Image (cartoon, rainbow, N blue to C red):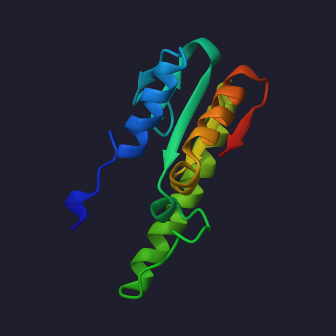
Amino acid sequence: MMQAVHSKDTKPEVKVRRALFHAGFRYRLQRRDLPGTPDIFVLKYGVVVFINGCFWHQHGCKLTTRPKSNQNFWNEKFDNNIVRDVKTSWKLSLLGFRVATLWECSLNTDFDRSIERLVAFIHSDEETIEI
């Protein structure tokens, strides 16, 4: 079952990349030399973009559930994911990067609005944003 879970080139990620390219942005993918290996790195603006699944990163929306079986394992895994995400954003901020986190639920409900907010963030001076 876990083999079906992909960490890169997911449908939401490819859709966001196409929208950014269409909007005129050029970017790099999966920069392994940066903390957390961001999904998208817009070098010209110093922006890194993470596209997070609500389940795996425990967003808190209706897509966020925790399995009933093997609860100790899943609770520890999800709690570690949350802590790792916070540390990663902090490290990237210290390195001078601006961090955007796009959540699966917002991309599913209003994709165009999410991309508009991301583009506005890229052009702004804000340090972080969650969409």
In front: 52, or 30? 52
Count of numbered labels shown in the rendering: 0
The N terminus, quarter of image: bottom left
From the viewer's side, name the closer residue of 35 and 5.
5
Give the answer, above or below, for where 22 lies relative to 56.
above
Residue 5 x/y as whole percent: 28, 57
In the rendered image, the residue lying farthest to the right is: 125
Q: Residue at x 47, y 20 (%)?
A: 21
**Residue 32 visible from this viewpoint:** no
Q: Position of residue 61 (x, y in %)?
A: 60, 67
Point 62% across, 41% down: residue: 114
Q: Residue at x 67, y 24 (%)?
A: 122
Left or right relative to 73: residue 5:
left
User: Residue at image x 32%, y 39%?
Assistant: 9
Tell whether 49 sits left or right of 68.
right
Would you place residue 69 above or below residue 22 in this image? below
On the question of residue 44 being in view, the answer is yes
Taking depth in this image into account, of 34 and 55 the one nearest to the observer is: 55
For residue 7, side relative to residue 112 (left or right): left
State the image coordinates of residue 3 (x, y, percent, origin top left): 20, 59
Q: Nearer the viewer, residue 123 or 67?
A: 123
> Where residue 63 sits in the image (x, y, percent)?
51, 68
Q: As displayed, is residue 118 above or below residue 56?
A: above
